[in-house]
Image (cartoon, coloured by chain):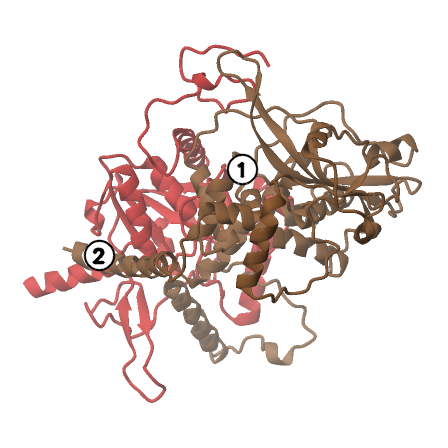
Amino acid sequence: MGYAAARGGLDAISAAEALVRDARDLANSPWLELDQLIDRQRLAVDRVMGEGGLWDPRLAARALQQSEGDTIEASHLLRSYRATMPRFAYSHPVDMDDARVLRRIVPAFRNPPGPQLLGRTTDYTGRLLDRTDDALARERAEKRSIDWAPAEQAVTTSNPTDAGTVASTGPTKAHLGDRRHRRLLDVLRDMDLMVDRRRTDDPEPADITRAATRPPAPRSAVLATMARAETGALVNLWYRNILGPDGYIHEVTLGEVRHAEIPVTVTHPHTGGPVDIGGVRVTEVEAIEDLDGADEDRTRFDAGYGLCFGHNEKKAIAMANLDIACHRDGGGVGGASDLEQSILMTTDGLDASGFLEHLKLPHYVTFRSMIDRKMAMRSARTAEHPVFDTTTATDAPVPVDPREGDCA
Amino acid sequence: MSATVSETIDWSIPTEGTRLDALVEPAVEAGILDEHAKRELRRAILTAVCVPGYQVPFGSREMPVARGWGSGGLQITLAIVGLDDVVKVIDQGDDEGVNAVNLRRLVTDTTGATETTEVSEATVIQTRHRIPEDALEAHQTLVLQVPVPEPLRGVERNIAELGRMHAEADYSRMWVSLYEDKVRNGVITKSTGYPCLVGGRYVIATTPIPRWDVPRLHRAPFLSLFGAGRERKIYAIPPDTDVEPLTFDDVPFEIEKTPGARCSLCDATEAYLIEIPPSDAAADDGRWICSDTAWCRRRRVEASQS
């Protein structure tokens, strides 16, 4: 008894799943291949790998394919896949100066040490919707493909604002391996313009996938949380600090914006020596903050750092800005700040969207209880002893509402 | 950096330089959680049982259900069920709720546990928003899905300060808020998830179960485990533990009760009833039914047989 009725729900779920699966997979157009997503929807794939916390372009493409292009849903698929796996090892630290740079911008100086490498970007391209007939666009692309090789082409110029006027042929791939450019931070340190808060104790970084990170948290936990955060959430948190009520960010100038490849090195299980097992692309940003606090060293700058999987400059820039803002808000002593709590608790795409979407679940048990209280309040007001009437007592102090924050 | 060879399986969290082959687990059936995760969850659960009402942080894993959809309860269930277990999953008291169905099939498909809708057959009952009407027994475990584990969030938003308040059992602001609520509204307006003092020490959020269910946690013979996946917290009420709703000596704790309401299917009055509103303002077809569907159905079967 009971089993047959319990299956009614399962039939409905199966039918809903079939609607999604059939409409997606049986659409009257060619099958969406993973290579197409990886090659032509690179930024979406990169974003999903970053927010999913897993570098695997094929799996990320598969997640996007399965999720009908919903990046948060795709990130969820990657993360829950990841969660089925044991943690075998941690990779070795990477010296970011060893990264193979694919793009590098230094907005703070016209002629920084090393080149301005525009790389693959639409930053200086007019946002004009290309309305060329699709068949013609395809024909033209096929003609161009004859003399195109799939390597990261970098465009070098001394100044990003000159980009449109500079020749578009950059160094060949062979030259890309050796690009150890001096960082702007090093230059500013040489000029004694930086607050030096480099630490020497080299603590182990926090693993946010294995511990519940809560304020006050080490900087590594805050950075790791932002590296996996939902891009839109970080962009919004950044903007909220510019125009919104928070205002922790003063005036940031970007030192380095880099898109680069780095190796992933682990300890070999048999030899015990380091071995490269692959590489990942990352976006790296250094943000220089003009310190203006009364208790801060106003003769110097301070810096924030951002690094995330893939090519995602919006995210890395927001991250670097929020990193320094978080440090300043915490008083520079690692104390918990409201901004730190906002970063740790509210920027994860799975957390926020999952909780938001849970509002679609049935809530009739809780709603009945709420109606019960409405009725109880009415009864109390009409009872023998009249209670405090809120409608006439506008000067009364507003009590803390115990229900605030409880949206279950 | 030096690698050490281990003859036995090293279950500690691996660090850089750990030999990979030392960490390879014995063959494990495909599941949602790996064995490391289950072990970590069990440790958190044990801590929670040892410190009733204390919110134990844990490294919540991403589940194949969205956060907010029972990911915490699911992790607890997956960590405690075995092949011998019989699992019942309800949402709003209903085994047929679509999310309950989805969670139940995830549990049974990946663990080999069997399923039931009957409380008496279940060893583990995962629930959202309700405690079954049937009395649970000592061998049964209730797993509650928790959206908001922090009972004090309404009076304090800062997490570090919340930690201090719990550590020092400083619940004064909670009491003040309840007092102000009573003075302002004539009643305490908190609907579900009513704050309770557990074992005389920690104040907890009783998920959002209705107030109807709250007295049934007091000195209950069974173990209750609360899982908040999104907020990465597990807490517990061990058997025979005091669970006292926060209220004043002269303000009795009130459960949901509508005079005259009775289930239109099984005629019950002593059950948590949900309202089916009238089809329009003029109609007189509003009625009540039990939220616990399995309980209600069994009452009807028993009534028809007698």
Specify few, some or many for label 2: CA neighbours under 10 Å numbering under 14, 14-19, or 20 or more.
some
Which amino acid, mark 1?
Answer: Trp
| Residue at figure coordinates x 64%, y 34% from the top left | A261
Tell me: A198 left or right of B229. Answer: right
Q: Please, is residue A238 above or below residue A223 in the view?
A: below
Residue at horizontal 39%, vertical 41%? B75
Disc 2 marks a residue whose amino acid type is Arg
- The chain that hosts pointer 1 is A
Residue located beneath label 2 in the image = A7
The one of A108 and A207 positioned closer to us in this rendering? A108
Q: Within the image, what quadrant is residue B47 found in?
A: top left
Percent of width and height locating residue B218: 36, 48
- The red-coloured chain is labelled B
Residue B303, image x, y percentages = 11, 64
Residue A194 placement (x, y as % from top left):
87, 36
Mark nearest the camera among 1 and 2 is: 1
Residue that numbered label 1 is attached to: A55
Whether residue B200 can be seen here: no
Between A128 and B98, the one lying in front of the other is A128
| In the rendered image, the vertical position of residue B206 relative to residue A179, given as above or below | below
